[in-house]
Image: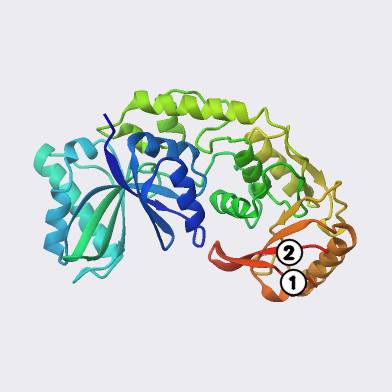
Amino acid sequence: MQDQLWDVIAVVPASLEAEAAAELEAFGAQSLQTLRRAVRCRLDRAGFYRAHLQARLPFQLLRLLASFPCSSRAQLYGGVQQAADWQGWLPPQLSFRVEASGRAGELNHSHFTALEVKNALVDWQRQHSGQRSDVDLEDPDRVFHLHLGQGRQGPMASLYVAGSSSSLHRRGYRAAMGLAPLKENLAAGLMAITGWDGSVPLVDPFCGSATLLIEAVSRVLQRPPGLLPGAALEPAHHAQARRFSCLQWPDADLGLWRSEVVASAEQALAGSQQPLAPVIGLEKDPEVLEQARSNVAAAGLEAWIDLRPGDGCELMPPPGPGVLVCNPPYGERLGDEQALDALYHRFGRQLKDHCSGWSLWLLSGNAKLTRALGMKASRRVPVSNGGIDCRWLHYEIR
């Protein structure tokens, strides 16, 4: 018998919605619809578990618990209390956090909306058990999200529960970060856009914490981001280590989860057997280079990623052609713009002198600096990096 399909929202980086939808479709998602910074779809239980283990782009996967008409405080309060069997979904011993978005009727402030959802939940608990859950904004056992919007019949509320109580972009390998870190899921999405498949060399001349290289190699080797290298296969381990709260839901199927974990581990084992072209990262700051090496080791990728001390402006690539990727400083957080202008100019000269035939993908938050490269981008993908409006620029080096 086919498992029930769940209505799911995947929260993803801006401008990567299409890539996220394609990824979810590979896990069996149906009725896909791209939204702003999100993808709506339907997934069965196995696909939902698989996405938590293998999806590289979502921040969060939200399962719909209930939708109900809502334009007032009273409708919100009553609708939340009737949305689920809270004895199973939120026992008093579990902590929780409520997030809210959108507006409807008199409910036009997300903080007030979230507070009212919290009140409805703890009041229900007190009425039925005499106890209530604690609110934990930092490390909760449950995360609920209430979205207000306009439905076909008028204002509606949709109440979701998150499958993980911490963001899925935190893979667990990056205890060491540089001063301007790139989120792991954004790096994964950027590398997906490049189309790099491991058959040609990959070089990051300004590798920083090595996130671009780690995410690129992990994808090609089919390493599931939801499983750290050497992780135990037991569900209890994952519930604690990665905060997969979906394993503590009242309708959790731990046997199915275990099967998906085994399948993901077998996929990673098979992927590690495939040949890979050289993957090289350069970093001239010794402390940052040591951080990057720690990250690569934590990801279990020392055998595939070669990190070296070096200045990207003196890059001498391996025999190519190949793909260059980088997230150089662009003045918002690191460095002086005048010095950076000189750096970009030197980098552009080095590329034209020594990297002919290679492809370059560069993350830029400063159009003036990228003009100093002296090259014309053939493609520009808008992305947001830490609140900075950026472009993922593609150059064919001649």
Does residue 230 appear to the left or right of 29 in the view shown?
A: right
Earlier-in-chain disc, 1 versus 2 = 1
Percent x, y of residue 391: 62, 67
**Three-letter amino acid code at disc 1?**
Lys
Residue 329: x percent and y percent? 70, 63
Residue at point 67%, 27% (across, down): 273
168 over 72 or under it: above or below: above
Quarter the C terminus occupies: bottom right
Quadrant housing residue 313:
bottom right
Give the residue furthest to the right. 353
**Where is residue 253 shown, x and y percent of the image?**
31, 28
- In this rendering, would 66 be left or right of 128? right
Q: Which class describes the residues within 10 Å of circle 2: few (<14), some (14-19), or many (20+)?
A: some
Residue at (38% x, 43% y) in the render:
165
- Which quadrant of the view contains residue 293? top right
Residue position for label 1 = 376
Question: Residue under circle 2?
Answer: 395
- Pick the quarter of the image with the N terminus: top left
